[in-house]
Image (cartoon, rainbow, N blue to C red):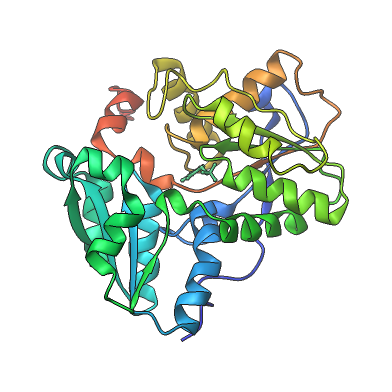
Amino acid sequence: MTTEKFSTLASVVEQLPSHLFCGHEQVFIKRDDLIHPIVSGNKYRKLKLHLQKVMQENKNRLVTFGGAFSNHMVATASAAASHGLKSTAFIRGEELEVNFNHYLKTASLFGMEFIPTERLAYATKKNSLFDLHFGKDSGAYFIGEGGESEEAEWSASEIVDELPLDTDIIVLASATGTTAAGLLRGICASKRSIKVYPITILKNAQAQQLKLDNLSIPYNYEIISEFDFGGYAKTNDALFVFIKEFISATGIVIDPVYTGKALFALKSCIESGRFESTKKIVFLHTGGTLGIFSDRYLKNIGSEILVCR
Ligand SMILES: *Cc1c(COP(=O)(O)O)cnc(C)c1O
């Protein structure tokens, strides 16, 4: 079997309606959400090199960590199933009990097994947990939480070659900064002058800044940290109004944890003049569309159903 289970074609770049972005005529979106319905966006990019290794080394199980709202965990479960592999996720025990949500159920659908783990062990002993449970299992392959790894950065760097040649700015939702780091590597390697604006979707701007600074490649990015809405998976009404307006005007699904916040930030930055109207902006859709389809979020989308009489 090969890793060419998922399309290797470059995802399309589409223009977004200017009325959604204060009249800006040059806002585009790179549709990495279309790579695969479950293994979407940057989670596919992050898994790609791992899957190549797994197949070369004849491993038979992917092992990773997952939070109850982890796109990486679901992507790992789905990618494992389509490559004939088994999958296991360490998950904090209390989340299995209280939060057996649609992420965990979707991962279960692909056959993922869970190992409930105490909060402390989960937080501090990730690698040793793997050794404890799979140290003697030569078929098991470990992938870090959120898919964070150097391999992940290298495959994210490939996105740069797929961007329109006249791209001035790329904007994306950023959590570990891995995808942003990959973009910077790609931009540096291709000698293009694209500026990267990572939008931090949780309160870790300093850590992300450090990670990108440590790449020690020419400074070509600016972290935007004012749009985390209070922290990871925190939301407000204005965010849901924007998400509903965006989805109904474009047909492109975005979520409240990642891409919804980042597009909201993009719009606000255009509004405030931070992004000039002459610049060609590409928003990277990093996937994660499963996020909006939880009752918890859908109930915020509005109670009035439009009925024609
Ligand atoms: C995981 C994820 C991110 C964050 O990517 P990083 O490389 O960790 O910064 C952004 N958007 C979506 C939809 C994600 O699932």
- In screen coordinates, is 179 left or right of 232? right
User: Taking 274 as reference, is 198 above or below it?
Assistant: below
Residue at position x 56%, y 70% in the image: 7
**Quarter in which the C terminus is drawn:** top left
Question: Up-down: is 191 above or below 260?
Answer: below
Say which of 125 and 81 sits in front. 125
85 left or right of 143 in image? left
Residue 247 seen? yes
- Along the line of sight, which residue is nearer the eye, 308 or 210? 210
Q: Position of residue 50 (x, y in %)?
A: 50, 68
Viewer-closest of 141 and 201: 141
Who's the residue at 66% across and 45% down the image? 181
Total number of numbered labels?
Answer: 0
What percent of the width, then of the height, locates residue 139? 33, 79
**Location of residue 274 with respect to 160 vertically, above or below:** above
Instruction: Name the image quarter holding residue 38.
Output: bottom left
Q: Which residue lies furthest to the top in this view?
A: 272
Residue 55 vs 155, above or below: the answer is below
Q: Residue at x 88, y 51 (%)?
A: 191
Closer to the camera, 110 or 242?
110
The image shows residue 21 at horizontal and vertical percentages of 67, 25
Q: Residue 64, image x and y in percent?
A: 34, 58
Q: In this view, does 282 lie to the left or right of 306?
A: right
Q: For residue 5, say whether it is visible.
A: no
